[in-house]
Image: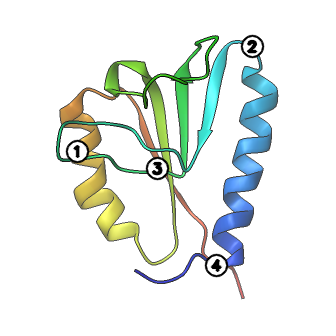
């Protein structure tokens, strides 16, 4: 996997900033935090919107029933995200998946 570049990190920061303001007190915005899909799969999406919990998931990582939305920001991983991660999230019951392409424009 190639290193995460500045375009990718800037997109993640921007999405986090907007969603955190919109959802403050209503849902939790996870940034590159794991989600336990099953015993063998714990992907780390760029952004996740989680059902509100006062403990911020202190006792355990979120599972699919806690997840409202997953956002993957992609440069070179668009194919992997779309063909591997998207079906895995869907099979686990995560209701919404978005993919954001972060490639810089020349």
Q: Disc 2 designates what residue?
A: 25
Q: Secondary structure at mark 3?
A: loop
Dot 1 or dot 2: first in sequence order is 2
Give the CA separation, mark 4 to mark 1: 25 Å
Q: Quadrant of residue 65?
A: top left
**Considering the numbered disc 1 on the image, is that residue within a helix, a strand or a loop?**
helix
Q: Which residue is mark 4?
A: 5
Q: CA distance from mark 3 to mark 1?
A: 12 Å
The 10 Å Cα crowd at callout 2, few under 14, some 14 to 19, many 20 or more, is few
**Is residue 40 placed above or below 66 in the rendered structure?**
below
Q: Looking at this view, is 69 or 56 the one in front?
A: 56
Q: Earlier in the sequence, mark 4 or mark 3?
A: 4
The alpha-carbon separation of the residues under discs 4 and 3 comes to 16 Å
Q: Is residue 74 left or right of residue 77?
A: right
Residue on which disc 1 sits: 88
Taking the image as shown, residue 2 lies to the left or right of residue 105, namely left
Crowdedness near tag 3: few (<14), some (14–19) or many (≥20) residues, C-alpha within 10 Å = some
Query: x%, y% of residue 71?
Result: 51, 45
Q: Earlier in the sequence, mark 3 or mark 2?
A: 2
Residue 12, x across and y down, in percent? 67, 55
Asked whether the beta carbons under mark 4 and mark 2 sit within 8 Å of each other, the answer is no
Tag 1–tag 2 contact (CB < 8 Å)? no
Q: Position of residue 27 (x, y in %)?
A: 63, 19
Please tell me in which quadrant of the rendered image residue 101 appears. Answer: bottom right
Quadrant where the image shows the N terminus: bottom left
Instruction: Report the Cα–Cα distance between label 1 and label 2.
Output: 29 Å
Quadrant location of the C terminus in the rendered image: bottom right
Where does label 3 land, which residue?
45
Residue at image coords 40%, 68%: 78
């Amino acid at each position: 996997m190639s290193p995460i570049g500045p375009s990718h990190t800037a997109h993640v920061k921007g999405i986090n900033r907007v969603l955190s303001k919109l959802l403050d007190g209503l849902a939790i915005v996870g940034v590159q935090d794991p989600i336990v899909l099953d015993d063998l799969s714990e992907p780390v999406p760029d952004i996740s919107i989680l059902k509100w919990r006062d403990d911020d998931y202190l006792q355990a990582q979120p599972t699919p029933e806690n997840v409202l939305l997953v956002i993957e920001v992609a440069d070179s991983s668009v194919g992997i995200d779309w063909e591997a991660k998207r079906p895995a999230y869907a099979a686990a019951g995560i209701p919404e998946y978005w993919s954001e392409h972060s490639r810089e424009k020349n």
